[in-house]
Image (cartoon, grey):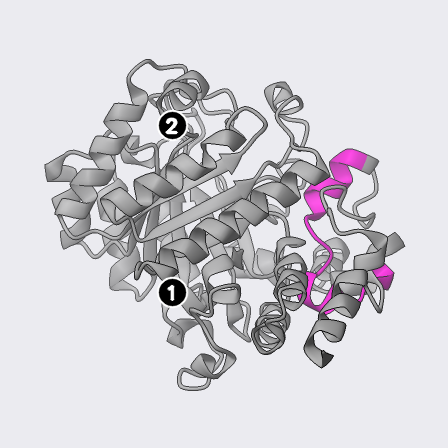
């Protein structure tokens, strides 16, 4: 995750981390990405069942649950093992997690064991009663997927009226005092809706938004035509940064992040330098290095509905183990798994322009699942990196221009 509001707007300073120390369990949620212990945030697809059939679903959700989903006893054991391991956050996802028959019990268990519980939902099932229950059991955050404004959202969700119901769910969360945010996957067909979503945030006073870069790992043919060009990606990040700054200048301070393209961090650094904001740029770079970039297999992991463990939620072709066979901590730290150990030290294995990039310590080499799908080589450069060769070398044109401006 790249915190646009943190880096570009100065919502977080490097000194903010000192008062908490670096361990993930001591950090507030907005600082978790800078933890020193890198205990993984776990995305748990608790069920394959979903009440929608979205065109871009990475989990291949179905109308009903998968036949091999974890039993309640197995699910409870998983929560206990994640808590014992020191995992800071469980993201309950799906399918649609609110369709799981024991979702409230599992969230309550996670909270009782000191975990932050987060829900990723399409919002259609968030009634006032559901929101109240989630609030009462201590859910930390509700991330609601929104694919754009009404027409595009309904098209992607293949359900007329889905946008209106989703917005009702968001309003219900706000009315019950639940922290809620928008989750948008940026695609060719919805890039023009980004500005409209910022308008929604301002009107409804929605405190958080995550803009996900599209990840095509070959599992969903519908995604192939939706990827932005590298130039369009830069333009989207420019717009997100500009609209975030505009909200800050008006007195609103939402948390705005981009996800799944680590090039965004160095790009924001270069952008700050080009604008002459050299002090802010250096603080942003310090934060990026504390973050360390790509976290698949290290600071983020995924558990499927049947207990299978993956390096992240997109890399379904790389199973690391099953919690039905051994506990999650034993899978995640197994020194005999040479590839997993390499993932945890990926900078030693990267090739090509990633290996020589001056931002390697801040980026971590991008998303390995994307590189593997595009090239067949898991250590190849991430093809979604939109930084030019000049920008990744010293001195870049933007860097040199900023230095000249500062000196004049």
Instruction: Identify the residue shown where x is 52% and y is 60%.
Output: 40
Quick check: can you spot residue 146?
Answer: yes
Which label is found at residue 29?
1
| Place of residue 141 in the rendered image (x, y in percent of width and height, measured from the top left) | 30, 52
Q: Main secondary structure of the magenta part?
A: helix
Q: Is residue 151 above or below residue 287?
A: above
Answer whether residue 283 is magenta in the image: no
Please name whichever residue, 401 or 19, is drawn nearer the observer in this view of the structure: 401
Identify the residue at horizontal 45%, vertical 25% (top origin): 61
Closer to the eye: label 2 or 1: 2
Q: Position of residue 231 (x, y in %)?
A: 70, 39
* Disc 2 to disc 1, C-alpha distance: 28 Å
Q: Which residues are magenta?
A: 355-374
The image quarter containing residue 200 is top left
Q: Nearer the viewer, residue 212 or 13?
A: 13
Q: Is residue 368 magenta?
A: yes
In the drawing, does residue 369 fall left or right of residue 31? right
Q: In the shown orientation, is residue 382 left or right of residue 100?
A: right
Q: In this rendering, is residue 404 above or below 249?
A: below
Callout 2 crowding tier (Cα within 10 Å): few <14, some 14–19, many ≥20: some
- The tag earlier along the polypeptide, 2 or 1, is 1
Is 271 above or below relative to 369? below
* Residue 49 percent across, percent down from the top left: 38, 26
Q: Which mark is residue 149?
A: 2
Does residue 339 lie above or below 133 as drawn?
Answer: below
The residue nearer to you, when weighing 162 against 338, is: 162
Q: Which mark is residue 147?
A: none
Work out whether residue 93 can be spotted.
no
């Amino acid at each position: 995750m790249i915190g646009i509001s943190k880096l570009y707007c100065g919502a977080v300073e490097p000194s903010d981390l000192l008062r908490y120390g670096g361990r993930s369990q001591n950090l507030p949620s907005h600082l978790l990405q800078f933890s020193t212990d890198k205990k993984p945030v776990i995305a748990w697809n608790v069920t394959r069942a979903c009440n929608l059939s979205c065109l871009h679903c990475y989990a291949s959700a179905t109308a009903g649950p998968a036949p091999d989903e974890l039993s309640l006893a197995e699910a409870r054991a998983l929560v206990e093992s994640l808590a014992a391991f020191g995992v800071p956050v469980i993201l309950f996802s799906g399918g649609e997690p609110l369709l799981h028959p024991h979702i409230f019990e599992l969230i309550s268990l996670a909270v009782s064991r000191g975990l932050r519980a987060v829900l990723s939902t399409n919002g259609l099932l968030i009634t006032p009663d559901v929101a109240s229950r989630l609030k009462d059991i201590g859910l930390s955050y509700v991330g609601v997927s929104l694919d754009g404004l009404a027409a595009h959202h309904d098209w992607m969700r293949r359900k007329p009226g889905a946008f209106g119901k989703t917005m009702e769910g968001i309003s219900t969360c706000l009315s019950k005092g639940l922290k809620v945010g928008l989750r948008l996957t940026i695609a060719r067909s919805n890039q023009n809706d980004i500005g409209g979503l910022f308008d929604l945030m301002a009107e409804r006073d929605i405190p958080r938004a995550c803009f996900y870069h599209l990840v095509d790992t070959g599992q969903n043919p519908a995604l192939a035509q939706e990827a932005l060009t590298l130039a369009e990606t830069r333009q989207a990040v420019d717009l997100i940064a500009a609209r975030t700054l505009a909200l800050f200048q008006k007195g609103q301070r939402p948390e705005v992040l981009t996800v799944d393209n680590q090039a965004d961090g160095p790009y924001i650094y270069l952008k700050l330098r080009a604008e002459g904001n050299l002090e802010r740029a250096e603080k942003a770079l310090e934060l990026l290095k504390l973050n360390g970039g790509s976290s698949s297999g290290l600071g983020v992991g995924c558990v499927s509905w049947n207990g299978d463990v993956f390096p992240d939620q997109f890399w379904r072709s790389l199973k690391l183990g099953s919690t039905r066979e051994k506990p999650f901590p034993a899978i995640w730290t197994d020194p005999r798994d040479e590839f997993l150990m390499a993932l945890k030290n990926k900078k030693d294995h990267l090739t090509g322009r990633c290996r020589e990039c001056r931002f390697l310590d801040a980026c971590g080499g991008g998303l390995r699942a994307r590189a593997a799908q595009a090239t067949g080589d898991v250590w190849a450069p991430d093809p979604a990196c939109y930084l030019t060769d000049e920008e990744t070398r010293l001195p870049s044109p933007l860097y040199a221009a900023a230095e000249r401006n500062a000196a004049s």
